[in-house]
Structure formats: C-alpha cells, structure tokens
Image (cartoon, rainbow, N blue to C red):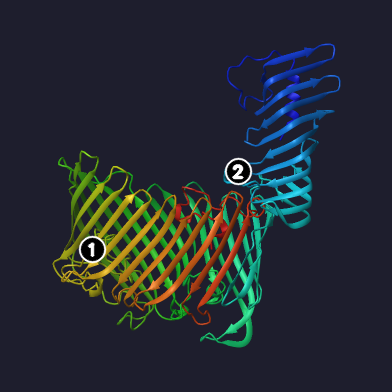
C-alpha cells in the first residue's frame, strides 16, 4: 500500500481551499489529482502547520484516506493522521489504525494499532508497525488470520490464526515472514514455529507445500502424500508429490504444466518400483517398475487452425486402480490438427488405445493412423438449400488380425421450409461412395477376401422431415406444445459387396436420440437400406415458475427387414420397438430424465434409463438407473441392470455430507460405495472420505480407502493457480480443463 505517497499528496494539497462536498468522496480519479473535504481547516503561517479536522476525507491517485484529524508540519516534514484512520486502495484492500505518522522524506512511517485487510476476511493486525522504503512493513506483536469471527454466534476467536512477535511484509517480494510464531486453533496454541513464510494474497501461483492428504487403503496400507508446488516461472510450474505407504514402496508423482505463446499443455505422471504379480494376482517374489503418464495440450496456429494432443498410458493394467489414480478401463491417446471456419471444418488425427480389462488383447486393438476428415459447407445456397461436401480417410493397423483402409467421399443437401400454417418441412438427400483396401484379411471378419483386395460401395438416400407444432398459451401462464413428427426416407436395398469390415458401427443403441436420424448407424461401415419412415409425437409444457415437462415417443416402420440390424437392436423387423423420453424439470436446478425402449409386441421394457441431476442451496445430486437386455451388437454384452448415486447435502453454511454408491442389480452385488463429511469456510477445508471398492481385477483386490484432507486457505493454496485451459471459443468446451492440471 502506497501509504507515504498518499500522505505526501495530502500534505501538498493542504494549501488549497477546502472543497465543499455534499457527498463523501470515493477512491479514484486521475493520477496526481488531490481533493479533500473536512469540517474545518486551520492554517498557522507562523508555525508553518496546516490542520484538517472533522470527518476528513482525502482522495488522491485512486486512494481514499479518512480520519478525525490530519495535520502537516512543514518545519519537521511530519504528516500525522489521528482518530479512526482508514486508507482504502482502489484494489479494495484497506488499512485501519489509531494513528499514522510519516517522517523524513515521507517514505518511512510508523503506525499504531494497525489492521491491514488483505481481502474480505484475511487481515494482519499489530500493536505497532514500521514502514521502510515504501515497500517493507515490520509489524510487532502481530496476528494473521483469513478467518472471520462470528460474534453473533458467540465466537470470540477466529477458527485459526498465527501469532508472532515479529512479522515482515515485503511487498516487493510479495511475501509475509513470521518470527517466533504460534499456530492457534480457536485461540488455543497448538504448534510453535521459530520461523516460516508464505506469499501474500496478490500471488496467485506460489512456491510452497500444498495441503497434504493422509489415509489408508487395503492395497497400500497407511499412506501420506505431501505435494510441493514449485512456481518456476509465471508460464510454467512443477508439482512434486511423494506418496509414502506402509504396505507399498514409495510413489513419486509429478505434475508439469506450461503456457506458451500459442496455447498450453500439462503432463502428469508417477513412478514406483514394487512387487510384481502374475496374471492371477499373486506376488511372484520379484519386483518391477510401475508408471503412468497423462497429458493434454491445446495450441492455436492461427485464428482458425490449431493442434493438440491427449496422452494416456500406463505400464500395468491394474496399476491405476491399485494406487487410486484412476478407475478407467480404457486409455486413449491422440494427436490432431484441425481447422474451423464457421460450419466447415477439417482435421487429421492419430489414435492409440490401451485396454485395461482382463479380456483386452493389445494385439487386436488397432492403431488409427491417420484419420482425416473434411466437412465443407458452401457459402451460397444450392436450389434453395445448404450443400455440404464430406471426405474422410482412415487406416487401422493391428499387430495381429485385420488391417483396413477406407476412403469415403459424399455430398449432402438440406432445405428447411416453414409453411403458412406453421408446418416445418425439411427436404434432405445424401450420396456417398467408399473404397476399402483390406491390408491383412481375416477369414472370420472378411470371408472370401484376400490380402490387398479392393472393395467399393455407393449409397444414396433422400427424404423429407415434417413437423407440425401446435402451441397453446393458458390463462395461468402455462405454454403447451403438441408436435407430430414424420420423417420419410427413400433408399435402395443392399449393403454392398461381401467382406466389407465393420469397424466403426459396432455399437448401435436405438433410442430417442437417433429416432429421427436418416441413418441409425454412427459410422460408415454399415448402411441402413430400403425405404422407411420414422414417426413420433412430441409434447412439451413450460411452467410459469421456470419448470417444464417434455415427452417424446416414436418408432420406425419399413417395407422389408434390414439384415444389417440385429433383432436385439429393436430395428431388425419391419416395425421397430417403441422408444421415448420423458424430461421433467420440476423447478430450475433439478432435471429428471427417463429414456425407454419398449418391445413392439408386448410393450415389455427392453431398455430403461433414469437420470436425476440437480443442485440447489442445500443439495447436489447425480443419480442414474440403467437396465439393458442382452445385445450381441453391443460387443457381446449380456444383460445389465445397475443403479448409481452421488450426492452432497449441505447441513448448514459450513458442513456437508457426501455419499455415493454403485450396485449391479443383475448380480445383486455392490460395485462401489462412498461416504464423506466435509467442512469448508472462508479460511479452511477439511474432508474425511471413505470409499469401498467391491470388485476384484487380477492383482487389484477389493479395497477400502480412507482419506483425510486438510487445507488451510492462504497457506496451502500454492498450486491453485488459474486453470491451465481457460474458456476459449476456439478450443471448445470438450477441450477445456476446468480444474487445471490436477484433473485426474
């Protein structure tokens, strides 16, 4: 705080006439300008003194000083402010004192009974303070705390504070140092520390120890993790997190993040040398290395072009679970370049996958190199509609099994129309051709095809989408919409030559999301052929208070069966199953969604999903229920029925209870359960968490984890800098990392 500069400006201004002001002055104004108001001004020409008294307010260069009395002695060069002294800076920080005195060149000063408010609650208080060189303040018999005191609840001391015989606040180095300090909890001394320091509140990325965590797991025993954040430069930093456990060798975790002139990236990894296990989860008696690395990078080459990468690799299938790093069962690494211009885009990508399930075979998992796509939308309308050109190239390579390359090109056209009666009609058409090269044939997947064979196929469809919404406004403020929908698609029969592999259309889920897709498959390898119609009805009601109810139901009819669909998909016959969705928002902040697929013959439930998501002043909830019939088209999965819940209940302003669970209803077994209690206020965070994992995966056995995390804000936030990936319209929401480099 530039206290001396303010008082110097005050002294220079005292020779000017007092301003008559009906309203109090506010901080601000142009640099070097000085205005003041007071009830009384007295100038002693003989004594060369000027005195302002009574509600004194002086504004200068963005600062505001208020006091009962301000005087300036031209003989001694002393400026004195007394009585309820308050100095407010333009940044919101504030200093209060009984008396402020500056001597000499007006850069050094002495303050009695000082209190410096660093933010809303954080403050430094002392019996006496001395300011040197305009940037170094020494406080005697001082106390620091970021906690507020709730006197209305009978609280007389902050939750925690630090007392010290001497505190030095170096505003140039942006650091606060303590001598002969004591850490107190509710005014009771707990720990005495001869000396320590921390960055002041203006530093957002600081070097220092972060909040430790401790606990126990069935795999690791008791453990403690103490991260150290090293702010090497404003553009890059390193976090070192050693984990010490009683039942496992130490683990070293590293987090590196860096911002560049074109973007940002982070790398997160770990390493340990511990007992080796066989495929059955038994110790072999030897030891081996375990490690992992995660990373993400996003960079811009220009306003429309960029590139990036995602990195996910581990040395062992079960290492991430055993050391509580991640529950993922598949890791994906990629590198990409992309270009965007309005609705047109192009990209070139490469993918590598690592399956972590016991049934995964890395030799059969493809490396995708390259995957290139182009989608170009013409600027000018064609026959009153939008014309888009698409092209793609993909190559899949395996250590064992099928290798394929596919080149595809197509053109699509659509034209929406709104008729006088309010009917919404869209005409659409698409033509596409594909060329496949079978690099290494597989007699099971591509019967009758030899290595190096070329296969080609052309597809064409056209159709019309018709919607007729009826809208009604009720007298009590409800809005109701009834909308019949019909989509007719005309396409030839046939799926092309035998032997075309299916790589990108393995998973088909017929539901409300693709009911009105002209082609139900997500990829290009399988095509939907023959004439068909998609029929549905949508009802929506919007409540005056902001809630809503929406219901969508429909089905598909076709002239003949399509052999591309399995019967279990619900699309294997001339009439499909019935699909629907109910979305209920009883009030803003809570959403309930139910998605259904009913058997076309007996209306039995073949697929049922329920999602509940919401947050309010006293709760956060994320719950789901899933029931699936066995479907060979979904990579051979059997029937599934599962329920999960994650929730947080706020007991009061500070306390919350966290709970969650996943249960496999098909096998009647728990998968995971969580429970925790948390306390958080403006100056501290404490959480005690319990987790039980009931599943076994080779050497990763069912485990119980208990973790205690304690964070004293303002002392342990060194690594909580601004997120690495800021909100960037170019990057897109899927590429942002709201939690920075500690997102795993």
Identify the residue under disc 1: 579
Q: Quadrant of the C terminus?
A: bottom right
Quadrant position of residue 479: top left
First in sequence: mark 1 vs mark 2 = 2
Q: Position of residue 214 (x, y in %)?
A: 62, 67
Q: Does dot 1 land on a helix, a strand or a loop? A: strand
Structural crowding at the residue carrying mark 2, measured as other residues with C-alpha within 10 Å and reported as few (<14), some (14–19) or many (≥20): few
Q: Nearer the viewer, residue 466 or 131?
A: 131
Residue lying at the far top of the rendered structure: 45
Picture layout, residue 446 above or below residue 163:
below
Picture layout, residue 463 above or below residue 360:
above
Relative side of 638 to 692, left or right: left
Relative side of 538 to 522, left or right: left
Q: Nearer the viewer, residue 596 or 348?
A: 596
Relative side of 445 to 66, left or right: left
Identify the residue under disc 2: 151
Tell me which residue sits at (56%, 77%) in the image. Answer: 218
């Amino acid at each position: 705080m530039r206290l001396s500069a303010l008082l110097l400006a005050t002294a220079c201004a005292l020779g000017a006439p007092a301003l008559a002001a009906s309203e109090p002055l506010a901080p601000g104004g142009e640099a070097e300008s000085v205005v003041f108001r007071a009830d009384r001004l007295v100038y002693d020409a003989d004594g060369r003194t000027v005195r302002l008294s009574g509600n004194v307010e002086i504004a200068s260069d963005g600062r505001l000083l208020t006091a009962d009395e301000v005087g300036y002695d031209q003989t001694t060069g002393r400026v004195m402010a007394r009585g309820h002294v308050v100095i407010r800076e333009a940044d919101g920080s504030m200093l209060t004192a009984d008396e402020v005195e500056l001597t000499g060149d007006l850069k050094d000063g002495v303050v009695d009974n000082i209190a410096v408010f660093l933010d809303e609650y954080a403050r430094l208080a002392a019996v006496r303070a001395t300011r040197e060189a305009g940037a170094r303040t020494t406080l005697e018999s001082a106390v620091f705390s970021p906690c507020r005191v709730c006197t209305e609840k009978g609280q007389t001391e902050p939750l925690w504070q630090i007392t010290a015989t001497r505190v030095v606040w170096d505003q140039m180095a942006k650091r606060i140092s303590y001598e002969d300090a004591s850490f107190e909890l509710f005014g009771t001394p707990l720990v005495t520390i001869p000396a320590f320091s921390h960055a002041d509140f203006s530093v957002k990325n600081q070097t220092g120890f972060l909040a430790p965590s401790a606990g126990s797991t069935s795999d690791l025993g008791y453990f403690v993790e103490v991260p150290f954040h090293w702010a090497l430069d404003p553009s890059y930093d390193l976090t070192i997190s050693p984990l010490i456990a009683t039942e496992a060798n130490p683990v070293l975790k590293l987090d590196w993040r860096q911002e560049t002139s074109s973007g940002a990236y982070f790398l997160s990894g770990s390493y340990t040398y511990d007992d080796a296990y066989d495929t059955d989860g038994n110790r072999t008696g030897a030891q081996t290395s375990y490690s992992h690395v995660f990373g993400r990078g996003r960079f811009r080459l220009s306003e429309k072009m960029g590139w990036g990468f995602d990195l996910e690799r581990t040395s062992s299938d079960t290492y991430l679970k055993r050391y509580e790093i991640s529950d993922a069962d598949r890791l994906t690494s990629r590198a990409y370049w992309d270009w965007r211009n309005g609705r047109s885009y192009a990209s070139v990508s490469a993918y590598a996958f690592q399956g972590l399930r016991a049934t995964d075979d890395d030799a059969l998992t493809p490396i995708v190199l390259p995957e290139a796509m182009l989608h170009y939308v013409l600027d000018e309308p064609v026959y009153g509609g939008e014309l888009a050109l698409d092209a793609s190239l993909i190559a899949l390579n395996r250590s064992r099994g099928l290798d394929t390359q596919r080149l595809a090109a197509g053109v699509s056209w659509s034209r929406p129309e709104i008729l006088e009666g309010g009917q919404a009609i869209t005409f659409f058409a698409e033509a596409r051709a594909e060329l496949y090269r079978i690099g290494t044939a597989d007699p099971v997947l591509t019967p009758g095809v030899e290595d190096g064979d070329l296969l080609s196929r052309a597809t064409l469809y056209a159709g019309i989408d018709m919607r007729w919404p009826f809208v009604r406004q009720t007298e009590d403020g409800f809005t109701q919409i009834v909308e019949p929908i019909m989509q007719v698609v005309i396409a030839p029969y046939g799926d092309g030559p035998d032997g075309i592999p299916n790589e990108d259309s393995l998973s088909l889920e017929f539901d409300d999301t693709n009911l009105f897709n002209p082609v139900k498959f997500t990829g290009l390898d399988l095509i939907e052929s023959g004439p068909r119609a998609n029929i549905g009805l949508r009802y929506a009601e919007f409540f005056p208070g902001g809630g809503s109810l929406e219901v969508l139901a429909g089905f598909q009819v076709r002239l003949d069966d399509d052999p591309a669909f399995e019967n279990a998909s619900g699309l294997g016959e001339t009439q499909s199953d019935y699909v629907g969705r109910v979305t209920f928002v009883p009030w803003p902040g809570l959403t309930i969604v139910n998605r259904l697929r009913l058997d076309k013959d007996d209306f039995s439930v073949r697929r049922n999903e329920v999602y509940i998501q919401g947050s309010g002043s006293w709760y956060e909830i994320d719950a789901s229920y899933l029931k699936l019939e066995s479907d060979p088209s979904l990579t051979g999965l059997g029937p599934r029925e599962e329920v999960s819940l994650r929730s947080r209940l706020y007991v009061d302003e500070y306390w919350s209870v966290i709970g969650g669970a996943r249960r496999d209803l098909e096998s009647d077994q728990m998968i995971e359960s969580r429970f925790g209690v948390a306390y958080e206020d403006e100056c501290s965070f404490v959480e005690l968490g319990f987790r039980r994992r009931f599943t076994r995966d080779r050497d990763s056995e069912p485990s119980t984890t208990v973790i205690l995390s304690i964070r004293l804000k303002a002392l342990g936030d060194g690594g909580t800098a601004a997120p690495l990936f800021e909100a960037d319209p170019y990057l897109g929401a899927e590429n942002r990392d709201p939690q920075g480099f500690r997102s795993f």
